[in-house]
Amino acid sequence: MRKVIKSLALGVLATSISTGALAADRYPERDITNVVVWSAGGGTDVVNRMISAEMAKFLDVNINVTNRPGGVAGSLGMSYVHRKRADGYTLVGLSESVVGSAVQGGWNQKMDVWYPFIVGGSPDLISVSAKSKYNTLEELIADVKKNPRSIKASAGGAGSIHHLNLLALMNGTGAEFNYIPYPGSAPAQTAVMTGEVELVITSLAEQQQLIKGGNLKPLAMLVANDQELEGFGTIPSAFKAYPSLEKYLPIMQAIGLAVRQDAPDNVKQKLTTAFQKAIATPTIQKWAQDNFYVLSGLTGAAASKEFAFLESLFSWTLHDLGAAKVIPSKLGIPKPSELN
């Protein structure tokens, strides 16, 4: 009797494995859901809706985008998707801002539970009020070096990518600004225009209309190349005046989507192919050009390596700022200097 039961159990298991493999091979057979961890209308949401629409054309099914914001740094949406079956029918739309969720107590998973696809992001830049006396980054740095912490700077919330870029600027130039945190990019930019702070670091996508409208004066891009902005002119790279910044920058946004890492290889391959074709379409290329997005296109191991770096950088920065509830090493997150 035991042999019969064992034989039946093995038969059920074999059938289950065979059925799963067959389902993965025929993937996708139905519509896919992409759960964005941030609110509708935000940068991550907009990018995910666009890339999902393009990917759907190559998968021959719909990709329905929904939003599940909340928790800590996107933890609610990530937890929801991670509880779903690893069959490729539920994706998560995310950004680099989620990488600090674990050390802030949002959940207990590292970013390696995801197989990510990175669309890209908009580069950060340093701007001051249009009424500011500063016209170049060199003038600004010279003043703050004479009087450390005398100049207030905003860069979104503590531990954000913009804050990390401010820290990188200080490390690369030796200038010590007085950092004033704000709950987001919009209030940080408003603070410059109202005179609460002297400078702001946010993305070009976020600042472009304020620059064109004459409210902000850009001093330098925090990437290696100059940027042409229609209606304004050339925004120089900070690297020209301060080559040492190459040791710390650029720290770029990483907006995209992911499937569970333990999804079948065939599922991940089909998603990868659709993603690569989608990001090369004229629709995505034109949108990126019009909105000052640098397209990444990283997938698989390369995308995972990028998120591992950002997870390490964000987590240990939050720890050093006293904003981490969990020591990164307890989660197995190495320091940036320990990464290969």
Image (cartoon, helix red, strand yellow):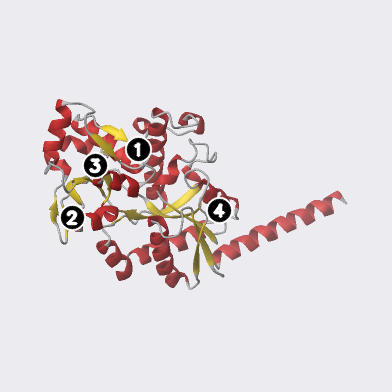
Q: Which of the two marks, 4 or 3, is nearer to us in this view?
A: 3
Label 2 neighbour load within 10 Å: few <14, some 14-19, many 20+ = few
The mark found on residue 181 in the picture is 1
Q: For this rendering, which residue is in front, 42 or 311?
A: 42
| Residues at marks 4 and 1 touching, judged by CB atoms closer than 8 Å | no
Tell me which numbered mark, 4 or 1, is placed earlier along the sequence.
Answer: 4
Q: Position of residue 73 (x, y in %)?
A: 47, 44
Q: CA distance from mark 4 to mark 2?
A: 43 Å
Q: Which of the two marks, 4 or 1, is nearer to us in this view?
A: 1
Q: Label 2: which residue? A: 214
Residue farthest toward the right in the current orientation of the protein: 1
Q: Amino acid at mark 1?
A: Pro
Q: Which of the two marks, 2 or 1, is nearer to us in this view?
A: 2
Residue farthest toward the front in the current orientation of the protein: 194
The mark found on residue 195 in the picture is 3
Q: Label 4: which residue? A: 81
Q: Amino acid at mark 2?
A: Gly
Q: CA distance from mark 2 to mark 3?
A: 15 Å
Q: For this rendering, which residue is in front, 54 or 37?
A: 37
Q: Secondary structure at mark 2?
A: loop
Q: Position of residue 88 (x, y in %)?
A: 53, 59
| Residues at marks 1 and 3 touching, judged by CB atoms closer than 8 Å | no
Q: Is residue 339 left or right of residue 133?
A: right
